[in-house]
Amino acid sequence: MLEIKNVYKTFNAGTINEKKALNGLNLTLNDGDFVTVIGGNGAGKSTMLNMIAGVYPVDSGSIMIDGVDVTRMSEHKRAKYLGRVFQDPMMGTAADMWIEENLALAGRRGQSRTLRWAISKGERADFRERLSELDLGLEDRMSTKVGLLSGGQRQALTLLMATLKKPKLLLLDEHTAALDPKTAANVLRLSDKFIEEEHLTALMVTHNMKDAITHGNRLIMMNDGKVILDISGEEKKKLTVEDLLQAFNRISGDEFANDRVLLSK
Amino acid sequence: MLSFMNSLPGAVAQGIIWGIMAIGVYLTFKILDVADLTVDGSFGTGGAVLVICVTGGVPVGLAVLFAFAAGCLAGLITGVLHTKFGIPAILAGILTQLSLYSINLRIMGGSANAPLNVTKYTVLVSSRNVISALLVGLIFSVVIIIALYWFFGTELGHSLRATGCNESMARANGINTNSNKIIGIVISNGIVALSGALMAQYQGFADINMGRGAIVIGLAAVIIGEVIFGKIFKNFALRLFAAVCGGIIYYVVITLVLKLGLNANDLKMFSAIVVAIFLAIPFWKRKIDDRKIKPVVEEV
């Protein structure tokens, strides 16, 4: 489904702020994989997701989604393959537009925008039904501006928007990090639900080791812009936080001391 | 006071024409969240194109369309400079505006002023018949508002709104934000030039300075409309209409302060101060609000 081959990315190359974000990254996702991604700050987790989404171009290497080479494709063009939820709840929705308008925009991901009406009657009924799955009462507030919703509500809505039109790949970039624990748990539950029901292929970046272990069928750990650990199947089911910390210690050596604090249990 | 009352209809008529320009400014300033300074040039372009067309024998209706198209072209230049050349929107607008000074002179055959004899040619609006000018101006603004109301209800219109509201979100949903910005700036300048075409007819000439400070007048109209009618006009069409009303109020106030003895030379400074204050009000209001301690809000 996703094939990342030997991707390099350096920010601010040649300056004092030079930062090698991705360092020969290789990753292949199979159809239906739900992969959780962990790693310390600066490990390249978010950069990887942004490279897949085309937020900025790669320096070298290639990215294929479902057999299509998207390496040089612009962000809005490859959006047709991708559903995205960002860390910042403000980023995934248009605050000045209504809930149903946001959903209608998401419903046309990957299509050209014409002079037809933006929302059809049939869609409205469909949106109402999908919104009720969120259990937040948003189905009765479809003509409310999204800017009036709480961070958790907005993130749940973004998740619905990202999956409204089935994406080839769902990218979740620490999408619960900015939420309080209860809200975060709810958004995670919804993520699991949508991924399972729609049989989505997904990449979820998280700082929470426990979440990384309990969700998904595969876990990768990143360090220095590379995948340093890739665990799936039965092995992943038996995994504990302690195992992960040890593995991290073994592979990354000295840096562990710095990063241990950054990876919360 | 009597002379003020006498000049009131004329002020309202001019206010409506500037109000139409304010609709164009609304599109870029409020919807695309871009301050487009092209309008100072494209307003004059509209006037110049109209006068040259009409005096050259083109029917006035068609001449207005040509003016609209010329404005669209000016907007296209700014849009391309901004999105394809990577020039910040404000600077892109300034560059187009500056070059339009030369272009407008060219259109008017090298002179700074192109007269339009309204007794010799048929025109749509004229200061000689203020009441009819009022009506025609009103019809134009209503037709433009209806057209925009339709447009912003379409898929394309929605994607344009999303572009102005949140570019990351727009791109994540497959919207080409660059082309949407260009479309927005094009339509905006088309409307501005159309307003310039009406103004040239109304005053009976086009001149190289007619658009100077247009952006400030447009912003004043948008902001006045928002401050006065913002609480009652929620609907998009009504918001656009509020901008037109803002233009009328602006012109009536200007006429009043001139009658009260403000030196006409000081007018532009007066406009700038008014706009600066109105732009600052929301910022100050937020600062004051931030000082107040807010209660904790429960998250869902």
Image (tube, coloured by chain):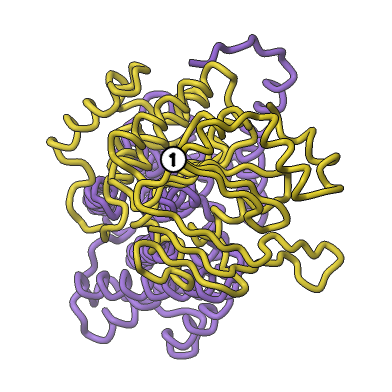
> Judging from the image, what secondary structure is the residue with disc 1 in?
loop
Q: Residue B167, percent across and down? A: 49, 52
The vertical placement of A122 against B85, above or below, is above
Q: Residue B221, percent across and down? A: 48, 44
Q: Nearer the viewer, residue A214 or B112?
A: A214
From the rendered image, report the letter of the chain displayed in yellow: A
What is the three-letter code of the residue carrying label 1?
Answer: Ala
Please name the residue shown 56% across and 53% down the image: B216
Judging by the rendered image, the residue that carries numbered circle 1 is: A94
The vertical placement of B261 against B232, above or below, is below
The vertical placement of A71 against B56, above or below, is above
Q: Residue A227, percent across and down? A: 62, 55
Quadrant for residue B247, please give it.
Answer: top left
Q: Nearer the viewer, residue A203 or B104?
A: A203
Please name the residue shown 38% across and 58% down the image: A1
Count of residue discs: 1
Please name the residue shown 55% across and 80% down the image: B99
Farthest-out residue, left: A122
Disc 1 packing (10 Å; few <14; some 14–19; many ≥20): many
Quarter of the rendering occupied by the C terminus of chain A = top right
Please name the residue shown 35% across and 78% down the image: B49
Q: Relative to residue B136, is residue A240 drawn left or right?
A: right
Camera sees residue B2? no
From the rendered image, report the letter of the chain displayed in purple: B
Camera sees residue A176? yes
The vertical placement of B97 against B216, above or below, is below
Q: Nearer the viewer, residue A163 or A122?
A: A163
Chain where mark 1 sits:
A
Q: Nearer the viewer, residue A131 or B240?
A: A131
Q: Relative to residue B43, is residue B257 drawn left or right?
A: right
